[in-house]
Image (spheres, rainbow, N blue to C red):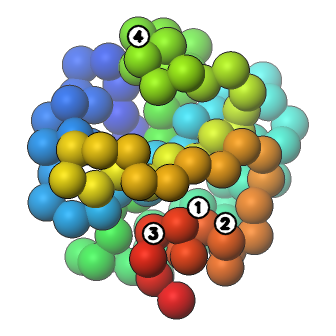
Amino acid sequence: MQHFDDSNFESEVISADGPVMVDFYATWCGPCKVLAPIVEKIADDFEGKLKVGKVDIDKAPQTARKYGITSVPTVMVFEGGEKKAAHIGVAKRDKLLAMAGIS
């Protein structure tokens, strides 16, 4: 599981080869704590196939603002430098994998 912020989001996510799942969260967010183990398990299970990382919106306000994060948790999938899919709130593993094009 990687951590992205304002300084590395462009190089790690936008310029990445292949899909990148990004979990936008906050340390004070209860639902984020529910979603975290699901995202971490996806990161472990699909290492090498899917890049997975987290963005703490309080530590990366420019990135959160740029992508219109108004509610956490928000999971986005980026591919080819573009936002491909997004889900706000806690989601099941199957939903997140479908967003990333993995079934």
| Pointer 2 residue | 38
Mark 3 and mark 1 in contact? Answer it, CB < 8 Å. no
Marks 2 and 1, how far apart in space?
Answer: 4 Å
Q: Residue 14, percent across and down?
A: 22, 40
Going from the N terminus, do you reach mark 3 or mark 1 first? 1
Question: What residue type is disc 4 on?
Answer: Gln
- Secondary structure beneath disc 1? helix
Cα distance in 3D space between marks 3 and 2: 14 Å
Tag 4 secondary structure:
helix
> Secondary structure under badge 2?
helix
Q: Residue at x 55, y 21 (%)?
A: 68
Residue 92 at what x, y percent from top left?
A: 75, 70
**Rendered-image quadrant of the N terminus:** bottom left
- Per the rendering, the mark at residue 39 is 1
Q: Percent position (x, y) of residue 9? A: 28, 31
Q: Which residue is at a point 46% across and 82% down the rendered structure image?
A: 102
Query: What residue did someone put label 4 on?
Result: 62
Amino acid carrying label 2: it is Ile
Task: Say above or below: 43 vs 22.
Answer: below
Q: Are marks 2 and 1 in contact (CB under 8 Å)?
A: yes
